[in-house]
């Protein structure tokens, strides 16, 4: 074992947890609506456990999104609905709350053996919880463990970990991007990660329908509160009209937030009467999670979601603006 | 001096060139329509020369784009039209061809003392030419020189170099992104570069006009050649109509290229009868530079530009499609 360079405290704990998994069947579970960090982390844990002689399989409630399928390779990864437990022990990755693995897996696994995550809000619901909130991604934590412990990192594992980091940092743009993030990215390249190949799969395989959805969304952008809030809409029927899927709305709200002077970007979707809202602030001062809480939602200071059933954009829009207006007025301006 | 780790051959040559500049006034010139690598490299060279006791000033034909102004800091950087030469010696950065510095500077500087660049097409027009085509950005080369030579890198220099690399790699997405790129990014963070602060300036200060231009462009997208080519237009009058500037068209063609199955993305702009075309291929197999050459243009295998005067999109579109069709037919499919 090489010296623990990245996580001198946690890497030995990870090794101890892995040692306890020996001889058991392991189910590596990610969260519903999986993203790059979730899929990358599942792939990386399953593969490394297998190199250590442990019988492991990845499980997710939802399908691997189209842009991430290429990174699974020959890793066993199945839907929760297809999973037949045979005394499996559960490991979770990138799941701040056990609820995030979905109802069927919660039922199958009353206990979770190991929980590896980078969300500061993680509820430490497992027997062993390795939560490192300074890491940009769960994949960054896993990569650090593997490098500290001298575990075998093959090219598919390296690419999966790289994808987790690249997507969860918004391509090295979010404040979580540190010197350590780049150091791990560098080493993953040496283990076989290919940044431009990853980028091709992630960003150059868009559907024309998604582009039409984006065009429709941009066309809807409206400024509120002296241009401090920018709101974009996906009206009822737009998914059908454009042929886009619900996954295609991922990231649209960032266009609303990207405008100079805008403090909060908003997206409101009407999914046949079930409204979903996304709120994104540039500055954690704005606490958009508090606004989301008023509408059956929550999240982080800079990124939150809300849910309103049996409504319409016409009805909900003024309600949300009233709540945002009160919130902005109560807060004033950041220093 | 630390051991030359990045560029053992070129770093000593750079040091020798810098030694020859001592006691002279130096004009550090970038290219017209400057991008992040151009501005970052100018800033980094001017600042380092000054720390070495050399009187240096940055000069550019065109204004620093709005999204890059924050990275100049207190670095002296002026327009070519405001420059009063006093026996200055010229250094160029990121300029593959001397023509790229613009007419006034070409006239003022019959000779260029030093030419640092990463374009493989660089014409080696200076007394000393340091061309490293494997580097992702001119800023990556300069950062490597500075680290090899132990030059002083202050926080503004580190951030400027980081911006050059981040923008010229498309945020670490292009094939030029290597393990060395990440290693240099890591060290720049340690010298004070702040990736998320850079990203905020680069990507979260868009104008509403630019968003409207994007929306207009997306609305124009058309598929050609069985969806292998996607073409977007900026029709005459659209800049006025949206309030966007010519700089705002930067990057639009990438949306055309981003669609699954598309091999070549195309943008055609009508600037009051002067047409500009941008061609972007996913695979260097396609040699879009050869197509661009037919229309008074050129560039790289994957990224080229063309220029047609006194025409209209209506007239030019079928001409370009004919040329692309012949090119695709002659090439066949990549292996």
Image (cartoon, coloured by chain):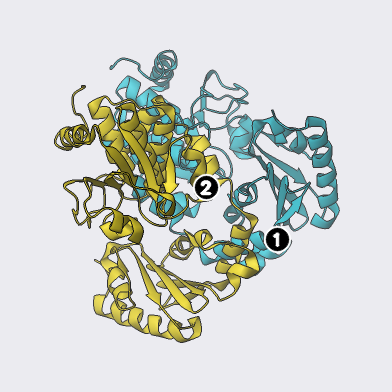
Chain colours: A yellow, B cyan
Q: Quadrant of the N terminus of chain A?
A: top left
Nearest-to-viewer mark from 1 and 2: 2
Which chain does tag 1 point to? B
Q: Which residue is mark 2?
A: A67
Judge left or right: residue A84 versus residue B132.
left
- In the figure, residue B237 lies in which quadrant? bottom right
Q: Residue at x 46, y 83 (%)?
A: A311
Q: Chain of mark 2?
A: A
Q: Is residue B104 above or below residue A256?
A: above
| Front position in the image: A19 or B318 | A19
Depicted A200 relative to depicted A48: above or below? below
Residue B293 location in percent, x, y? Answer: 76, 35
Kindly identify which residue carries mark 1.
B220
Q: Position of residue B139 (x, y in %)?
A: 44, 33
The answer to which image quadrant residue B281 occupies is top right
Q: Residue at x 67, y 45 (%)?
A: B261
Give the number of callouts.
Answer: 2
Foreground of the two, A14 or A305: A14
Q: CA distance from mark 1 to mark 2?
A: 25 Å
Q: Relative to B260, is A331 on the left or the right? A: left
View extreme (left): residue: A9
- Residue B15 image point, x, y percent: 39, 18
Q: Secondary structure at mark 1?
A: helix
Q: Secondary structure at mark 2?
A: helix
């Amino acid at each position: 074992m090489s010296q623990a360079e990245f996580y001198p405290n946690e890497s030995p704990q990870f090794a101890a947890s892995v040692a306890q998994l020996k001889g058991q069947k392991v189910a590596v579970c990610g969260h519903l609506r999986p993203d790059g960090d979730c899929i990358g982390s599942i792939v990386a844990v399953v593969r490394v456990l297998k190199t250590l002689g442990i019988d492991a399989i990845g499980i997710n409630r939802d399908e691997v999104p189209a842009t991430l399928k290429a990174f699974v390779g020959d890793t066993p990864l199945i839907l929760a609905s297809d999973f037949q437990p045979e005394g499996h022990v559960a490991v979770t990755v990138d799941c701040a709350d056990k609820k995030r693995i979905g109802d069927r897996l919660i039922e199958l696994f009353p206990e979770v053996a190991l929980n590896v995550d980078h969300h500061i809000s993680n509820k430490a619901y497992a027997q062993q919880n390795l939560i490192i909130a300074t890491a940009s991604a769960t994949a960054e934590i896993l990569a650090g463990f593997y490098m500290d412990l001298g575990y075998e990192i093959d090219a598919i594992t390296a690419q999966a970990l790289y994808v987790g980091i690249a997507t969860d940092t918004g391509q090295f743009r979010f404040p979580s991007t540190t010197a350590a993030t780049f150091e791990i990215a560098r080493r993953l390249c040496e283990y076989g990660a290919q940044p431009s190949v990853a980028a091709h799969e992630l960003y150059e395989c868009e559907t024309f329908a998604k582009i039409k959805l984006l065009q429709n969304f941009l066309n809807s952008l409206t400024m509120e509160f002296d241009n401090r809030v920018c709101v974009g809409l996906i009206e009822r029927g737009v998914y059908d009209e454009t042929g886009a899927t619900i996954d295609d709305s991922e990231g649209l709200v960032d266009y609303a937030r990207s405008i100079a002077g805008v403090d909060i970007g908003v997206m409101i979707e009407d999914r046949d009467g079930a409204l979903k809202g996304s709120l994104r602030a540039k500055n954690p001062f704005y606490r958009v999670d508090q606004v989301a809480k008023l509408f059956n939602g929550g999240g982080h200071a800079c990124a939150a979601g809300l849910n309103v059933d049996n409504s319409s954009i016409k009805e909900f829009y003024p309600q949300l603006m009233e709540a945002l207006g009160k919130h902005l007025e109560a807060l004033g301006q950041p220093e």
